[in-house]
Image: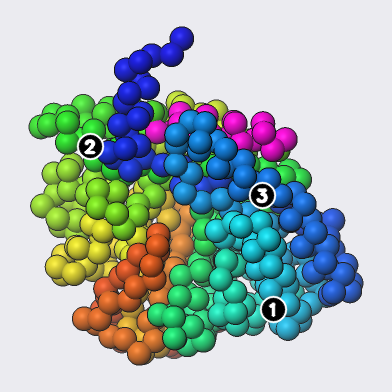
């Protein structure tokens, strides 16, 4: 039986507190598209994606109309193309990226993820060629997103891959310099990457996934902040309970949308990603949640403790609302996409070092961080290596999406528009880790990886 109070509460969440479904993402396997003819491979990929996801956008819009729940993005994730493009060189992968853009245009989706490689233990020829193609591919397409997994707790850290990614990031920044180096906003470097993540830029359709699947990412930082505000000066145990109950309600909305979308499209339901994904909109900020919890400003001492508690409570509440939780699930802290984070950086209260500490307890890592355009490849590699080490040591997913904004320095800001928002250029330490980075090879896996 429907409860009127619950219905009204959900309506208020949508109208006043920025509750939305951040994304419906259809995962599509492309293994049956493999061909030793690059032209045939591209044709098969285009046909498979456009045929399988033909009704994705339409279905999302129909569900929005029926239930009044905003669904911000409709997206597609695909098998990492390095796994299906063994015959391709860098030019061939660039051609495949244009094919993916053409498919995205045909479908009317926001992003397509899976221009990706898994190189945590070493590189195949295809993976190496893909990495060579990434900067130009991101410069010449709008919707294509790329990710590279360079480490796992089981395998250790591939420092050669990190060195290649530092170079790729700098090249992407240069090639998109006339558009605020936006290419880097579509590129993420991972440790322990999840294979069912619906959020870009890191989404791809993993090797253990079915032929097709629907994964849904929920949001709702504004809902959580409002609930904490209403709770007043309760103790921390009570506060955790408030967050859990709120996360449960948010996730139930996501479960409804995911089940409906899967049924209408005739595709299996995969997972709900519980992540609190902020936007540049006022009141839709993870930073503001932390401040409602009791911080004067995000970045103050105590920030990491607040974030750890928030992340844990969100997960505990969310897993009670859905039997299938996956992806990243927790709280995102992307600087450019969170108005509270932006304000904290502008005021000087939030540094890249504090953000790195926060990533030990949040869902992802150093996300949408803008740094001076003259930051060297080696320093970027050092930033990546530090963050990836946190993920490997703690057996969790971490990632880096860093933007060396070409031609800009500390004190400037870079604007991407839409959900990507804008970011103040953050200062970084310029002392070089070059000798360490250029040693190359693989950092061995930590001893606690031996759990068999």
**Seen in the image, is 359 located left or right of residue 27?**
left
Q: Nearer the viewer, residue 139 or 347?
A: 139
Neighbor class of circle 2 (other Cα within 10 Å; few <14, some 14-19, many 20+) is some
Q: Which residue is mark 3?
A: 27
User: Label 2 belongs to which residue?
Assistant: 226
Specify the segment rendered in magenta.
250-266
Q: Position of residue 280 (x, y in %)?
A: 31, 58
In percent of width and height, residue 264 lies at 67, 33
Kindly identify which residue carries mark 1: 94
43 or 125, which is in the foreground? 43
Specify whether residue 447 is in view. no
Colour setting? rainbow
- Rate crowding at label 3 as few (under 14), some (14 to 19) or many (20 or more) other CA atoms within 10 Å: many
Distance of label 1 from label 2 (alpha carbons): 46 Å
> Under tag 1, what secondary structure?
helix
For the point 29% across and 49% down, which residue is it? 284
């Amino acid at each position: 039986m429907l409860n009127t109070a619950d219905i009204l509460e959900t309506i208020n969440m949508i109208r006043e507190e920025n509750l939305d479904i951040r994304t419906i993402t259809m995962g599509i396997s492309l293994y049956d598209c493999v061909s030793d003819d690059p032209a045939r491979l591209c044709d098969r990929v285009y046909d498979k994606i456009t045929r399988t996801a033909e009704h994705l956008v339409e279905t999302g819009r129909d569900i929005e109309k029926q239930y009044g729940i905003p669904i911000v993005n409709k997206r597609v994730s695909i098998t990492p193309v390095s796994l299906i493009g063994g015959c391709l060189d860098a030019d061939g992968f660039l051609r495949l990226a244009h094919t993916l853009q053409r498919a995205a245009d045909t479908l009317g989706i926001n992003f397509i993820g899976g221009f990706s490689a898994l190189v945590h233990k070493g590189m195949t020829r295809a993976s190496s060629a893909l990495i060579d193609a990434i900067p130009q591919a991101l410069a010449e397409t709008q919707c294509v997103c790329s990710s590279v997994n360079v480490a796992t707790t089981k395998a250790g850290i591939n420092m050669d891959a990190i060195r290649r990614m530092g170079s790729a990031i700098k090249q992407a920044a240069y090639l998109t310099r006339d558009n605020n180096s936006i290419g880097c906003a579509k590129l993420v470097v991972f440790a322990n990457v999840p294979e069912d993540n619906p959020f870009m830029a890191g989404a791809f359709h993993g090797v253990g996934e079915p032929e097709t699947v629907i994964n849904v990412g929920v949001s709702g930082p504004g809902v959580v902040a409002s609930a904490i505000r209403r709770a007043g000066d309760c103790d921390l145990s009570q506060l955790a309970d408030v967050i859990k109950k709120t996360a449960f309600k948010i996730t139930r909305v996501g479960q409804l949308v995911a089940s409906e979308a899967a049924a209408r499209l005739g595709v299996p339901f995969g997972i709900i990603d519980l992540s609190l994904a902020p936007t540049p909109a006022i009141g839709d900020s993870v930073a503001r949640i932390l401040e409602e919890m009791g911080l004067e400003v995000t970045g103050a001492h105590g920030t990491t403790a607040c974030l750890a508690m928030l992340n844990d409570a969100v997960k505990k509440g969310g897993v009670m609302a859905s039997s299938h939780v996956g992806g990243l699930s927790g709280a995102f802290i992307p600087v450019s996409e969170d108005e509270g984070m932006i304000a904290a950086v502008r005021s000087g209260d939030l540094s890249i070092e504090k953000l790195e500490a926060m990533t030990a307890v949040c869902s992802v890592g150093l996300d949408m961080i803008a740094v001076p355009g003259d930051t060297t490849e080696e320093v970027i590699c050092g930033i990546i290596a530090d963050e990836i080490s946190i993920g490997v040591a703690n057996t969790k997913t971490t990632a880096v999406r860093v933007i060396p904004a070409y031609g800009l320095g500390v004190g400037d800001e870079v604007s991407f528009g839409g959900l990507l928002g804008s970011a103040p250029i953050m200062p970084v330490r310029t002392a070089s880790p070059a000798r360490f980075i250029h040693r190359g090879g693989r950092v061995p896996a930590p001893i606690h990886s031996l759990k068999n």
